[in-house]
């Protein structure tokens, strides 16, 4: 089906609405040019990044063997593909971004609740990627200027320097970095292959590299780690599974974007994760301890040329991934708060400052805080948002939206003064049940499965609360 076939002509009055600005407007048919290739390339570009490597490396550091770690990544990304494709559909069909789509279920003002929750998580990711870039600059300077290594505040200074680079790119406009999108994935893939080749040579082949057994002596012990690890893997991309309409609104057709994502996401994540798994496993053989951070691992290389080239490549690719994956969504989300005053660019600037406030150095302190604390924690909130939006679009509204009313006060999505309290209630219920495991040890499994629990509970609660309610259709 064509992405434009269900899109009614926009009424002129939406442009004078306080809920409208050009950045949030439905994408015109002539601008919907993204094909299957574009969506496959998007996911290759976003999946081949340092945090994919660190996610898989964290599983090895936590005690898994290489097969268990790679299988966890594959299963997790296959699962998250489902909500990804479901939320992609309304973006491709109606051409609206995530915060506007959320108005259908949360209300034209209540959508800000979902949008800000998503934006805050994106700010955290922005800070994490910026911290990694700062680490790379710090090690790079220490390599070419050894005296820099004695600087107590070196990492903090480099973090702020890389943060400033990101801010300047946003102020200049994302078009300044678009030409890098086609090369960022090959660059990081090259660094990964370099590390893989080094590990293969230093450890004495794949046999010793992958011979380390699992530290879990029983199925029960494995499950205690596997369940939150799988939840964290789903949580890794549960962010983009919400705001994927920000990208699919440019789709030429609904089928093409779905195929591109289905092919690229699980396969690319699994393949690049294998590099992280193999190299992290090799560090146990080479150094006697697992090193899950590739930037820190590069600092141990003896060749300054290899270190410099690799870190420059990481900086370039990290900058690109950070802008593409962690600025587009929150910029739109913050713009949705006050469409007439907050532009996409200003939303990006807000993201930069919030990224510092999230203190990314604490989120990356170790694999447990990253996987079980950060990923599992926000999954408990974003899972319910996904459950509500998917239930609303597919079950309650049966894929029919009155697009113009998404931009108007007093329309189909006004609810109670702009808020759908049924959606807010379902969000609170879903999140509370998922987070209950943090405070009640006997039901810890609820938090270990936070995304799944939050999604299912909020989905069911929203359906029950909205059942029998008359829904206007376009």
Image: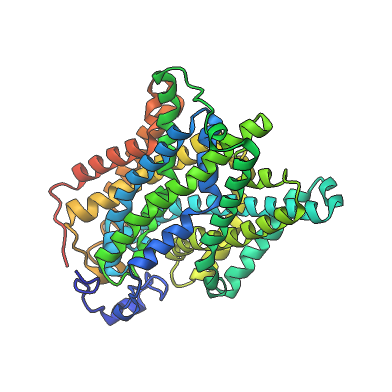
Residue 442 pos. (x, y %): 39, 19
Q: Residue at x 58, y 58 (%)?
A: 318
Q: What is the quadrant of residue 417 in the picture?
A: bottom left
User: Would you place residue 291 above or below residue 77 in this image?
Assistant: above
Quadrant of the frame with the C terminus: bottom left
Residue 121 pos. (x, y %): 49, 50
User: Would you place residue 90 above or below residue 286 in this image?
Assistant: below
Q: Residue at x 40, y 25 (%)?
A: 223
Q: In front: 245, or 255?
A: 255
Quadrant of the frame with the N terminus: bottom left
Q: Is residue 410 visible?
A: no
In the displayed structure image, the side of residue 443 where residue 137 appears, left or right: right
Q: Residue at x 54, y 28 (%)?
A: 212
Q: In front: 443, or 313?
A: 313
User: Would you place residue 15 above or below residue 203 in this image?
Assistant: below
Residue 354 pos. (x, y %): 58, 54
């Amino acid at each position: 089906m064509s992405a434009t076939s269900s899109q009614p002509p926009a009424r002129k009055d939406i442009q004078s609405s306080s809920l409208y600005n050009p950045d949030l407007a439905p994408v015109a048919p002539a601008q919907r040019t993204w094909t299957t290739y574009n969506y496959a390339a998007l996911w290759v570009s976003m999946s081949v990044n340092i945090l994919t490597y660190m996610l898989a490396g964290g599983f090895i550091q936590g005690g898994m063997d290489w097969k268990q770690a790679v299988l966890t990544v594959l299963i997790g990304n296959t699962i998250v593909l489902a909500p990804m494709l479901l939320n992609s559909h309304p973006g491709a069909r109606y051409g609206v971004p995530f915060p506007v789509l959320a108005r259908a279920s949360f209300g034209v003002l209540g959508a800000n609740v979902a949008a800000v929750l998503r934006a805050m998580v994106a700010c955290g990711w922005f800070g994490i990627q910026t911290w990694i870039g700062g680490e790379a600059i710090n090690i790079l300077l220490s390599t070419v200027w050894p005296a820099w290594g004695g600087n107590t505040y070196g990492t903090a200074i480099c973090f702020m320097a890389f943060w400033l680079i990101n801010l300047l790119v946003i102020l200049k406009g994302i078009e300044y970095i678009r030409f890098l999108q086609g090369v960022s994935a090959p660059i990081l893939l090259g660094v990964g292959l370099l590390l893989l080749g080094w590990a293969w040579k230093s450890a004495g082949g794949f046999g010793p590299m992958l011979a380390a057994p699992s530290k879990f002596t029983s199925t029960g012990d494995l499950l205690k780690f596997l369940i939150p690890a799988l939840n964290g893997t789903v949580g890794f991309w549960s962010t983009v599974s919400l705001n994927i309409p920000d990208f699919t609104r440019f789709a030429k057709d609904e089928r093409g974007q779905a195929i591109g994502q289905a092919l690229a996401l699980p396969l690319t994540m699994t393949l690049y994760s294998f590099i992280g798994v193999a190299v992290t496993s090799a560090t146990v053989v080479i150094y006697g301890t697992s090193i899950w951070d590739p930037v820190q691992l590069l600092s141990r290389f003896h060749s300054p040329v290899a270190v410099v080239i690799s870190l420059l490549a990481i900086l370039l690719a990290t900058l690109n991934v950070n802008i593409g994956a962690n600025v587009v969504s929150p910029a739109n989300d913050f713009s949705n708060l006050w469409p007439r005053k907050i532009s996409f660019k200003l939303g990006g600037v807000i993201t930069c400052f919030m990224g510092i406030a999230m203190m990314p150095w604490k989120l990356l302190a170790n694999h447990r805080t990253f996987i079980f604390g950060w990923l599992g924690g926000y999954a408990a909130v974003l899972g319910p948002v996904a459950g509500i939006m998917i239930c609303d679009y597919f079950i309650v509204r049966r894929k029919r939206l009155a697009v113009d009313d998404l931009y108007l006060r007093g329309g189909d999505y006004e609810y109670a003064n702009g808020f759908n309290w049924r959606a807010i209630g379902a969000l609170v219920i879903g999140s509370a049940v998922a987070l209950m495991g943090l405070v009640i040890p006997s039901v810890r499994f609820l938090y270990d499965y936070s995304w799944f629990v939050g999604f299912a509970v909020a989905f069911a609660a929203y359906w029950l609360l909205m059942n029998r309610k008359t829904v206007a259709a376009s």
